[in-house]
Amino acid sequence: MTIPLITTKSEEIFAAAQKIMPGGVNSPVRAFKSVGGQPIIFDRVKGAYAWDVDGNQYIDYVGSWGPAICGHAHPDVINALKAALEKGTSFGAPCLLENILAEMVIDAVPSVEMVRFVNSGTEACLSVLRLMRAFTGRDKLIKFEGCYHGHGDMFLVKAGSGVATLGLPDSPGVPKAVTSTTLTAPYNDLEAVKQLFNENPGEIAGVILEPIVGNAGFIPPDGGFLEGLRVLTRENGALLVFDEVMTGFRIAYGGVQEKFGVIPDLTTLGKVIGGGLPVGAYGGRRDIMSMVAPAGPMYQAGTLSGNPLAMTAGIKTLELLQKPGTYEYLDKITKKLSNGLLQIAKETGHAACGGQISGMFGLFFTSGPVHNYEDAKKSDLAKFSRFHRGMLERGIYLAPSQFEAGFTSLAHTDEDIDQTLAVAREVMSSL
Ligand SMILES: *Cc1c(COP(=O)(O)O)cnc(C)c1O
């Protein structure tokens, strides 16, 4: 790897892309805006690695934002997809593969008694909110600052100042009327949630959260937080919804709910269950899911939902994850990475905090501790940008934002971690 990195082809392609697609990308974070500099155009991925169009190789800790938990382009997944491809890409009619993946999800995720497949995490969250409202006959929802639930209008709410305020839209184009029913609270703040329930008696359909946050950087729940939400929602006749789009099949096979033993009423899934193809899902209690059309009156549909290719990639990926030792391995290598990064930061004199659970990790350039989005925002973002660029130039591909978690995979080896830490030492020493 040459420093500075030679990225001539990436630069040409991205320049052309900016003229024909907004910001040159189809999802904003990919444009590297928050770290600055040139985004890398990938050519191919395999195992723990990615190669760009200029031929540079990277150890990849983004993993397509989570789905690549078995390693990119796992041969078993590729072979299963090749076989499925021969039978056609989309039926628009029921297929057996849907039953198989549905049974796997129901067996794995404690809260899920019935499931509906959709095409993205965004779609899963939009649908689950409609279902929360349909089932309870209430309109308001509580979400947490810094938690991401896809780009649906009613989730695009930044927290107002103070403990908890009525939501104001985060993006132009989102009507105030839509977000006026979205209430927000700081993550890990049970008192704020209690107050919202008290101020809105009988009006709150439910609480939705990332049970471990990944979209504000990596923030785990404080002891008792999830349990407290379970009690509060029950007391107030509201539903508890875990958005496990990121954490499902990653933190443990059965997600955070299995790991921590707190069982929500409904769960959203995505990322890993699609094995790299576009899949989302929502599921939960049978009495609630029975409201979904055509079993019940709540409408939700999808032309490509449950398509045979996506189901195949999901089934194969979950099968691979079932092998004994999967989550122990992810935890082991990710702990080594996370502890190593913290140690190096300490030795090189940088304030930092962070942690990991299973194959998900984070590092903030602040002394911490980080319990919520406000804490996360105290990070030294300029330093993170320099760190990110330094790592990239030396062949380590990290998420291009301080406010994103990192991901490892079963394909990451001890040597990959050693190499990453050696590079991190070099970069942090030069910051
Ligand atoms: C990624 C993500 C989503 C959105 O999923 P998309 O497939 O990008 O629409 C929703 N919730 C969480 C927790 C996520 O991490």
Image (tube, rainbow, N blue to C red):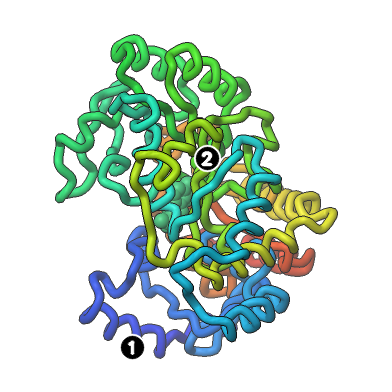
What residue appears at the point 60 percent right and 40 percent down from the top-left corner?
Answer: 112
> Comparing marks 1 and 2, which lies closer to the viewer?
2
Query: On the rendered structure, is 200 left or right of 208?
Result: left
**In this view of the protein, which residue sits in the foreground, 343 or 240?**
240
Determine the image quadrant of residue 426: bottom right
Query: On the rendered structure, is 71 left or right of 214?
Result: right
Q: Which mark is residue 12?
A: 1
User: What's the residue type where badge 2 is placed?
Assistant: Thr
Is residue 147 in sight in this rendering? no
Query: On the rendered structure, is 142 left or right of 364?
Result: left
Q: Which mark is residue 185?
A: none
User: What's the residue type where badge 1 is placed?
Assistant: Glu
User: SS at mark 2?
Assistant: strand
What residue appears at the point 31 percent right and 24 percent down from the top-left corner?
Answer: 138
What residue appears at the point 51 percent right and 59 percent down from the top-left corner?
Answer: 431
Q: Which residue is mark 2?
A: 267
Determine the image quadrant of residue 67: bottom right
Residue 88 point in image, percent of width and height: 52, 81
Q: Earlier in the sequence, mark 1 or mark 2?
A: 1
**In this view of the protein, which residue sits in the foreground, 2 or 223?**
223
Label 2 Cα crowd, 10 Å radius (few <14 / some 14-19 / many 20+): many
